[in-house]
Every structure is written in structure tokens, then in C-alpha cells.
């Protein structure tokens, strides 16, 4: 691989940043390790415009590591609901507890300690180090991978370990020892706003003189695409058990792989024949199903499968739930706002609320 002079590369990036870089993002004012950390986790697989209102709400409720560490998990998940990839929120919570206990409520300031915290990978740790602690550290988030793959014309999908390793070598080569915060932010900004996936604005790009993909005239060929694999499709009903008090039955999922710790609706995969559904309701909640209707089906896509969901609104007789059970509750539709509920479930409940 032929590299350019890192100082020239950095100069071009930093000059561009002083003119066009983003400096008014909520997590940049003020910049603290905690705020950088929260924003970096939120920004994984999520666009800046989506993240901004979530970040503001989250920081208002959990202004520091201590507040986050001491908060109930439900509360943390409720402030994350809608952002998806909930493992991120659970890991934030776990990491805050560790920092509160082992680091006097402060973010550690060396790469190894930061990476050892739950949910923080090498690139996120480097972003915290370079932006908040002003230490030299190379980042390689999704956008930066695209820029560097184009600059060096690195072929192949970055999920492949050889390609990934090659991109790290490039990131380390161009990493500066000064102006680390500006350089890191600039690389993120160039990836997000200039070197975009489908229509890179090469004429406005500070690294154009260094970019091999530009010289070849085919930036869109880099990085290589993920090999296609058809996602499996799961189909099931979600039961909205509704009683005469307009309460719905929600339960807290304990499946850590999918929506763990979030409030959801019971799944039903059998036939919708009335006697079968009645038996199911009776068996699980000792309640009587009086009527039911199906709502429009919709698809929710996860990274590893499509889920075709058909909500079934079930009118049931009010039953007392076991008092000790906190994982299953009757909830008023107008009280769902403060709960950690995944977006598709919230959509079903809000439709129901609108129809009342
Ligand atoms: Fe991306 Fe074009 Fe800049 Fe190369 S010149 S880094 S392809 S925007």
C-alpha cells in the first residue's frame, strides 16, 4: 500500500475542518468525556439528526456517570426506546456502574481501560480519547472506513478481518499527534457529509488530492459490499390483551438477544381459531377471551431477520395478576410514555390509543 505524507493529509483535513466542520452539535458544547461517550454510542448505526433529540433528553435525565449508574435499568431503557440496538443502552448502564465503583465516577483516560468497559470498542474508545482527552488515537467508525477505503483504494468488505486490519493500518498512519479532537471530528464529518455512500462530493473534498478511488474515477466501488445473504422471515401474532379498563397487558422480555429488559406484547404463533386462542389466553393468564380482531400486518427488520407481525386485539375479562410479578403488568395506554418499549410495539399501542 502506498501512503501519502501524513502531515500533508492532516493539514488538508484540519484546514477543511476550520472552515466547514461541525462545531455546534449538542455533545460538542460542552465537550466532556461523558457526553462524548454517550453521543458516540448513540451514533453507532444511527444518523446525527435522529440522535440529537435522544441525546438531549438522555443528558437531561442522566447528566453524569453517577446519575446513570444509580438509575433503574427501566428508566435507562425508556430513554433509549426508539433508538434500537438496546444492548447499547444496557452496556452504557453497566459501564456507568463500573466507572462509578472503580474509577470514582470518572471516565478512565487510557485506551485499555476504556476498551475494557462494556460496549466500548477500539474506535469508540479512540473517539473519546482524542475528542475529550485530546490524546492521539485513531478512529475507524463506519463513515471513516468508507473514506479511508476510498483514499487507499482498499478492496473488499470491511467486515472481513483482513480488510478491517488494513483499514486500521491506514487510520493509524494518518493519525495526528496534535489537534486530535479536530482531526477526529473532521474525519467523521467528511464521512457523513462529503464522502457519502452513493454520491460523494469529491469536488468539495479536502482529501481529493490523496484519493486513489477518485483518481480511478470509481469511488462507489469502495468499500466492497457485504456478501448478500437473504434474511430469514419470522411470522407471528402479537396479542394486545385489553381489559374493560382500557389497560393492556405488557411483559418485560428477558431474552437478552432481542429487546431484553423492554416491555413487549405476548407472542402467539398458533392458529387464530377462536377456541385455540381462548385456550391460550386461559392457560397463560387465567382470563376469558370475549372477542378479538386482527390489525394490519407489518414488517419490522432486524439486522439478522425480518419479523412479520400481525397484532391481534383481544378483549379479555379483567384478571388480577400475581402481586409479586413485576415483569407482567396491566398498563393504561396513556401511561406508556415513560416505559422502555420497542418502536414496533409502541406503534401498535399508539394506534390503539388513537382508536379509543
Ligand atoms: Fe471520498 Fe471523493 Fe473525497 Fe475520495 S475524493 S475521499 S471518494 S469524497
Image (spheres, rainbow, N blue to C red):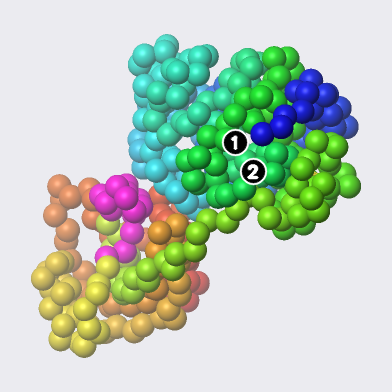
Instruction: Spot the residue most to the front.
Output: 1
Question: Is 259 covered by the magenta stretch?
Answer: yes
Reply above or below: 236 against 180. Answer: below
Q: Position of residue 16 (x, y in %)?
A: 85, 32
Query: CB of mark 1 within 8 Å of CB of mark 2?
Result: yes
Q: Position of residue 290 (x, y in %)?
A: 22, 83
Residue 295's quadrant in the figure? Answer: bottom left
Element under disc 1: helix
Q: Quadrant of the C terminus?
A: bottom left
Answer yes or no: is residue 294 visible.
yes
Residue under the image location 45 percent in, 18 percent down: 112
Which comes sooner in the sequence, label 1 or label 2?
2
Is label 1's Cβ within 8 Å of ligand 1?
no
Q: Which residue is mark 2?
A: 154
Magenta span dominant secondary structure: loop
In this picture, which residue range is highlighted in magenta?
A: 253-266
Q: CA distance from mark 1 to mark 2?
A: 8 Å
User: Residue 228's x, y, as percent?
Assistant: 49, 63
Q: Which mark is residue 167?
A: 1
**Which secondary structure, mark 2?**
loop
Amino acid at each position: 500500500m502506498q501512503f501519502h505524507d501524513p502531515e500533508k493529509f492532516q493539514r488538508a483535513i484540519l484546514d477543511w475542518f476550520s472552515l466547514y466542520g461541525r462545531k455546534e452539535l449538542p455533545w460538542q458544547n460542552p465537550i466532556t468525556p461523558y457526553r462524548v461517550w454517550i453521543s458516540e454510542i448513540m451514533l453507532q448505526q444511527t444518523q446525527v439528526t435522529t440522535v440529537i433529540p435522544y441525546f438531549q433528553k438522555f443528558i437531561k435525565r442522566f447528566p453524569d456517570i453517577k446519575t446513570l449508574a444509580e438509575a433503574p435499568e427501566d428508566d435507562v431503557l425508556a430513554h433509549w426506546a426508539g433508538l434500537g440496538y438496546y444492548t447499547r443502552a444496557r452496556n452504557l448502564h453497566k459501564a456507568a456502574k463500573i466507572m462509578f465503583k472503580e474509577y470514582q465516577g470518572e471516565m478512565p483516560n487510557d485506551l485499555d481501560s476504556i476498551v475494557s468497559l462494556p460496549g466500548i470498542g477500539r474506535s469508540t474508545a479512540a473517539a473519546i480519547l482524542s475528542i475529550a482527552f485530546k490524546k492521539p488515537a485513531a478512529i475507524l467508525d463506519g463513515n471513516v472506513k468508507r473514506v479511508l477505503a476510498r483514499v487507499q483504494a482498499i478492496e473488499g468488505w470491511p467486515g472481513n478481518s483482513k480488510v478491517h486490519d488494513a483499514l486500521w493500518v491506514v487510520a493509524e498512519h494518518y493519525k495526528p499527534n496534535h489537534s486530535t479532537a479536530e482531526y477526529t471530528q473532521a474525519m467523521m464529518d467528511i464521512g457523513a457529509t462529503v464522502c457519502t455512500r452513493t454520491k460523494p462530493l469529491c469536488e468539495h473534498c479536502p482529501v481529493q488530492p490523496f484519493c486513489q478511488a477518485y483518481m480511478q474515477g470509481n469511488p462507489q466501488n469502495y468499500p466492497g459490499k457485504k456478501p448478500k445473504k437473504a434474511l430469514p422471515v419470522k411470522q407471528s401474532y402479537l396479542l394486545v390483551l385489553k381489559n374493560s379498563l382500557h389497560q393492556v397487558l405488557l411483559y418485560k422480555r428477558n431474552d437478552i438477544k432481542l429487546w431484553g429488559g423492554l416491555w413487549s406484547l405476548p407472542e402467539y404463533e398458533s392458529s387464530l381459531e377462536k377456541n385455540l386462542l381462548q385456550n391460550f389466553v386461559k392457560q397463560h393468564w387465567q382470563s376469558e377471551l370475549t372477542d378479538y380482531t386482527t390489525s394490519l400486518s407489518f414488517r419490522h427488520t432486524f439486522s439478522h431477520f425480518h419479523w412479520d407481525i400481525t397484532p391481534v386485539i383481544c378483549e379479555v375479562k379483567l384478571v388480577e395478576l400475581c402481586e409479586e410479578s413485576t415483569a407482567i403488568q396491566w398498563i393504561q395506554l396513556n401511561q406508556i410514555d415513560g416505559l422502555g418499549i420497542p418502536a414496533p410495539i409502541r406503534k401498535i399501542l399508539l394506534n390503539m390509543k388513537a382508536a379509543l
